[in-house]
Image (spheres, helix red, strand yellow):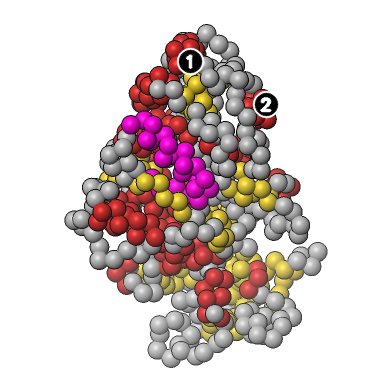
Amino acid sequence: MENVEKKSTNFIEDFVEADLASGRTEKVHTRFPPEPNGYLHIGHAKALCIDFSIARKYGGLCNLRFDDTNPTKEDTEFVNAIQEDIRWLGYDWANLYYASDFFPRLFDIACDMIRRGVAYVDDQSAEEMRLSRGTLTTPGVNSPYRDRTPEENLDLFIRMKNGEFPDGSRVLRAKIDMASPNVLLRDPTMYRILRHHHHRTGDEWCIYPMYDFQHPIQDAIEGISHSLCSLEYEIHRPIYDWMVEQAGFTEHPPRQIEFARLNIKGTIMSKRYLRRLVEEGHVAGWDDPRMPTLVAMRRRGYPAAAIRDFIDRVGVAKADSEVEGALLEHCVRESLGNVAPRAMAVLDPVKVTFCNWPEGKVEELPMENHPDHPEMGARTLHFGKTAFIEREDFMEDPPKKFFRLAPGREVRLKGAYIVKCEDVVKDENGKIVELICSVDLDSKSGCEGANRKVKGTLHWLSEIDARPIEARLYDSILLPEAEGVAEETETEEGEEAAPVAKDFISRLNPDSLKVISALAEPVICDAPAGTTFQFLRMGYFCKDPDSTEALPVYNRTVSLKDSWAKEQKKN
């Protein structure tokens, strides 16, 4: 038990330590087994972090395995994206495998099970098998083909492999117990006929193993000690153990342990539904920053450390629960707050002219890049005759406790001067187009005698420094669920179940993306794609790959308002 920390912190680690102590497990070996039929989302991140961190904590190994047994949905694009996401999160695998690497061996194991009389070829249609399987309260009925001889079954299975029968005409089933109270044990399907080009094996195979056969046996082949999976697979555990035993892996067999899946309120957590959003054009792609995929979160500016922190805070539990998305945003703010440089951008600008500022005069003002990290240096901004502030920072008739700019009121411009609104200029429609302000010339920040207090401090941009940018502001892709709308839980083969509203397309938020023309200081515009800044008072923003030299594009990662932290203080 080298490299074992002093005590376990969750029930999975309790199992692992007990298995190490008893000798059931000699070395901890886990695996992360995604199906390459889409991009990883935040729900997969929980399983990923658990698989890799358990192996890391106990000095073991973690494999990456692509369960590529359904060629109709799988693609090399997803294989490459999944590997990139894993490395971005800070993990690496001991071995890289594909289920397709093991197709010959899985076929041989199936043939051996046929010879021993624990598997048979069934000619029933899918509907006939469904009806004969029974219900939760009534036992199933044996297939009329269940008592075929091993020789006949083996001949038919080989002919299935050789392509003699049409798709869907026959399947290979395990012979377990059609009266089992666990419906999944009522002779589950092991292989089906499916002619479809595979992203790795091409057209070599026309039969493909089913998840409940392939997955446990491949765990055993790889020497996996602990097969960690989400809670909906608990009912599959008897099949898992049966398949491992029948395949002959009786020494140090893998143990399946289930944990609660990750559910985030108001978030779509199923690749099937995410694929629909992409294919129907509701989003720009798998990396659209509104998506809960890891590639989208990375593009939006979420740090990998924040996602790991979020998963750690959610914890490992045995019962499903729903997490507030505000917790994830809190983790993002905590991660970025200490590392993101500060800069100024005005998202909805209104022009300000300083009536008493000398014509042609321009001052250079030093601005720190981070208030807590002087080692991050400083930059220079300019102050001249005209500037811009946020339109929402001015009101003609302000309510109480509005401490920003108003007629006759003073505010400080961050790192510059105290200014006072003297007049308002409007267009023919009554829209404010310019503010006329005076400058207290003795109030320059950092100068002696400039510490006169005013209640409001605003960010701003000199017209000299202001450059155009495109800002993309994101909101939840789903509207709040209507009262009484039922939720469904759907499981794809090899994929975690995901609760999603049946009418989720009708719940798509039409305002989930707002694209606005804004202004920003040069350091923001000149940064490389992927750079994150805190736009003072406005939130954290990350430069998007869509940026051009003429027009930088910034995605708002999160706002500065932290509702989760506020609720924690109340509690």
Q: Does 180 sit left or right of 430 as displayed?
A: left
Residue 149: give its label.
1
Most extreme residue toward the top is 164
Q: Residue at x 76, y 59 (%)?
A: 483
Is residue 71 visible in this depiction of the protein? no
- 103 in relation to 528, above or below: above
Q: Residue at x 81, y 64 (%)?
A: 429
Give the spatial CA distance, label 2 vs label 1.
24 Å
User: Dot 1 lies on which element?
Assistant: loop
Is residue 73 visible in this depiction of the protein? yes
- 111 in relation to 183, above or below: above
Residue 235 forms part of the magenta stretch: yes
Residue 127: give its label.
2
- The magenta segment: 227-248
Please state which of residues 131 and 91 is positioned toward the viewer in this rendering: 131
Q: Amino acid at mark 1?
A: Thr
Q: On the rendered image, what quadrant is the N terminus found in?
A: bottom left
Please state which of residues 542 and 439 is positioned toward the viewer in this rendering: 542
Most extreme residue toward the right is 429
Of label 2 and label 1, which has the lower sequence position? 2
Q: Quadrant of residue 33?
A: top left
Q: Quadrant of residue 145?
A: top right
- 239 in relation to 108, above or below: below
